[in-house]
Image: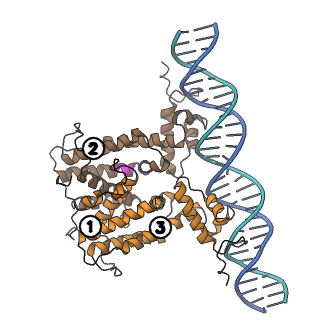
Chain colours: A brown, B orange, C cyan, D blue
Amino acid sequence: MVTEQARTGDRYHHGNLRAALLESALEVLTETGVAGFSMREAARRAGVSQSAPKHHFGDTRGLLGALATRAYRQLCERLEGVECSGLDARERVTGLAVEYVAFARDNRALFDLMWRMTQFDYDDPELAEQKHRALRALDRVLRGTDAGSTSDEDPGSVQSYAVWSLVHGYTSLALEGAIDEQAADPLASDLLPAMLRLVDLRPVDGR
Amino acid sequence: MVTEQARTGDRYHHGNLRAALLESALEVLTETGVAGFSMREAARRAGVSQSAPKHHFGDTRGLLGALATRAYRQLCERLEGVECSGLDARERVTGLAVEYVAFARDNRALFDLMWRMTQFDYDDPELAEQKHRALRALDRVLRGTDAGSTSDEDPGSVQSYAVWSLVHGYTSLALEGAIDEQAADPLASDLLPAMLRLVDLRPVDGR
DNA sequence: ACGTCCATCTTGACAGTGAATAGATCGGCT
DNA sequence: AGCCGATCTATTCACTGTCAAGATGGACGT
């Protein structure tokens, strides 16, 4: 019954430091962005010493990597929750795109971090697995299969990669201010659905 | 005739420090990536003191911003040099995509930096202008106009944004290792042309 | 020719960071 | 009861970005 006092008492052993650090680190990341992130600040907010994170995450890369991995999981869950029944392919893909963009806007710093882990020489197999999972979710929406069944057959069609690239590229460009600078919130415009209308979604011969 | 001795003599006044710093900074950036960049190291390699860059670039953001702006210019020049005469729209766009991807692969650290300047709160008008210039180059290739004439009429059609998003997204995903991990060099595969074949390039009514 | 001005560069200092080492604390297990 | 190992702290080091103050020397007017 040690796990009971998970509230941040001032005991020597925190009891739930790993989770608390992930929480405070996310807070710091959100406020300062990836560039200004500080592990010491995260530890400070969690109420522990500067080197406490070492035992749980190794170094800064480990801490950020854990945050990124969790973010991938959240994104995948949202993508897997996209409604498919009774919708045609274009509606399904548009729904997926909306979800993708919403995640990026609501978790901007996290979204930035997610696509920058290789730059930190962070290649966790768990993280790679989540990337695969995202691709499978995309495949499912394209095929229109109901949620749950994610058959691994032929993961990554040309259509999947095309849709992913288009949506991801648009999101990145919009967040970087390269698109439609007169619009207040490019992520909320109807440009993305219009672009998706240009893509041939039928499962063609190409692979 | 002061500008003559641009070689790195050990004079007090370097004579060409700005250019030399850009050079050494690019070197450091290429070796260590954005995360490990150090302005002191750049100054060290240029053979000047740690605070010499201050007068020319202000702070680190200024130095990186100057590098990013120069990179945008280089990318734009390559995009503007894409051959158009005697090719159909799909061939033209494929040529542009190849150029885009080649630039990203040959200047990986710079490419990373380019899309991370807003995160540094760096919003230089010159940089914004170069983004516009890239979009105009894209428009030109889509319309098939010969190089040189970049009429500003209707900049940024849905097709332009779609192609840009697709190519940029694919490049980013590939560099991050999210695509086709069994291929040695995803950027050299024929997946990108296959994806572009799915996009309707005809100037439609949509806007 | 000469003195002054000012852009340019150096020196020195300060606060903050990531990381490593050694040691303190304490829960759980035999 | 007592030890062991997981967990956390204290201290230190090298490094970074940034600032203030001063040194240097080329340019330019007189």
Mark 2 neighbour density, 10 Å: few (under 14) some (14–19) many (20 or more): many
Q: Point out the image quarter for the N terminus of chain B.
A: bottom right
Q: Which residue is mark 3?
A: B71
Q: Chain of mark 1?
A: B
Secondary element under disc 1, as helix, strand or loop, is helix
Where residue B142 appears, as percent x and y from the top left, is: 28, 72
Where residue B55 appears, as percent x and y from the top left, is: 65, 68
Query: Label 3 to label 1, Cα distance in Å?
Result: 25 Å
The type of residue carrying mark 3 is Ala
Residue A137: assigned label? 2
Where residue A143 appears, as percent x and y from the top left, is: 19, 46
Mark 1 or mark 3, which is nearer the start of the sequence? 3
Name of the residue lying farthest toward the front: B184
Residue B159: assigned label? 1
Q: How many marks?
A: 3
Query: Label 2 to label 1, Cα distance in Å?
Result: 26 Å
Mark 1 neighbour density, 10 Å: few (under 14) some (14–19) many (20 or more): many
Question: Which residue is pictured at 27% across the width and 76% down the height?
Answer: B144
Look at discs 2 and 3 and give the one toward the viewer. Answer: 3
Near-viewer residue (B125 or B33): B33
Q: Is any part of residue A114 visible from this angle?
A: yes
Classify residue A199 as left or right of residue C16. left
Does A13 lie within the magenta span?
Answer: no
Question: Which residue is pictured at 56% across the width and 62% down the height?
Answer: B27
